Amino acid sequence: MNLNRIGTLSLPFLMLFMYYSNAQQNASGSIKTLYEIEDHVYLFQGGGTWALNSIILEGKDTLTLIDTHFSDENNLALIQQLKDTFPNKKVGTIVISHPHADHFMGVKLFKDAFGEIEVISIEGERNHMKQTAKILYNAYQEVSPNQLVKLHEIVYPNKQMGKDFTIHFSDRVAQFELVDQNESWKSLIMYLPDTHLIYLGDLYWGGLTLDIEGFGASLILWEKELRNIMDRKTGKIIPGHGVGLPSRDTILTFLDDILSFINTSKAFIEQGMQREDYITSDFHKEIIFFGGREMNLSQAYDEIKTAIENEKN
Ligand SMILES: [Zn+2]
């Protein structure tokens, strides 16, 4: 920055500039800052490779947390910042958006810090949660050298919801909707009807994971469900992972990319393309696959092939 220019900036503007510079630096570091994104709604975007997002709803007496972090470092940082920001309020409820351990590994640390907490998630997903905890535990150890949460200490939800529900906080209301993304991977999304803020959980984080050691996610249903969700009016959009907030256009472009990926795949498979050729082909670079192209593409091939056969019958 040109030093001569600083002289012409007012102090509040300079402070604002420094704040955003810091926010930018933090984007690549591991510690993040809790901030109020809307009245009584706080966002904490975690650092490190997982870059998870947590939302805090401030009630008159207690706090509701939506999704914890994966690494001890991020969970402890969030706990400390909550204690500093709300010295007289405890986290009374945690909502886990979907049964993947990167989003619920921290529940134990919040209970250690705040005492009894009601932990809400999706009915019928407990086994799925336990299995993802096992699968992801090595990754947790890599980002948490002190391993403050042992595998047998992971805290699972004590309240399981089989339908939509609401949580009131201050003078606002949060709607939690159950999205049946596919047979094995359900998700809760949160919508604030007054400002249209939406939390998408892992229905959007900039990429796709079609198979986590056999759990799978349906490419066709993913596109369909997310498009249904985006049919409504949206305000601020918060993804399950990532730095900053994606715009509505970014998500619609992502959906178009998936759809064209599906349609191109269909055409190739209908023309008789074999599995091995499909997996090694490089016809669609826009989509980021988490966990490797080969695993994801073989999952996509099988799903789309089955869909074509089902359409014929
Ligand atoms: Zn996730």
Image (tube, rainbow, N blue to C red):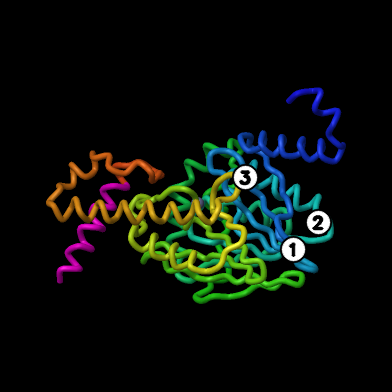
The residue where tag 2 is placed is 86
Q: Residues within 10 Å of mark 2 (few under 14, many from 20)?
A: some
Left or right of 81? Residue 136 is left
Q: Residue at x 43, y 48 (%)?
A: 207
Please identify the quadrant where the C terminus is shown: bottom left
Q: CA distance from mark 3 to mark 2?
A: 19 Å
Mark number, residue 46? 3
Q: CA distance from mark 2 to mark 1?
A: 9 Å
Please identify the quadrant where the N terminus is shown: top right
Left or right of 263? Residue 146 is right
Q: Main secondary structure of the magenta part?
A: helix
Kind of residue indicated by mark 3: Gly
Q: Is residue 23 above or below residue 112?
A: above
**Earlier along the polypeptide chain: callout 3 or callout 1?**
3
Q: Residues within 10 Å of mark 3 (few under 14, many from 20)?
A: many
The residue where tag 1 is placed is 58
Question: Residue 102 appears at what percent x and percent y?
Answer: 52, 50
Kind of residue indicated by mark 1: Glu
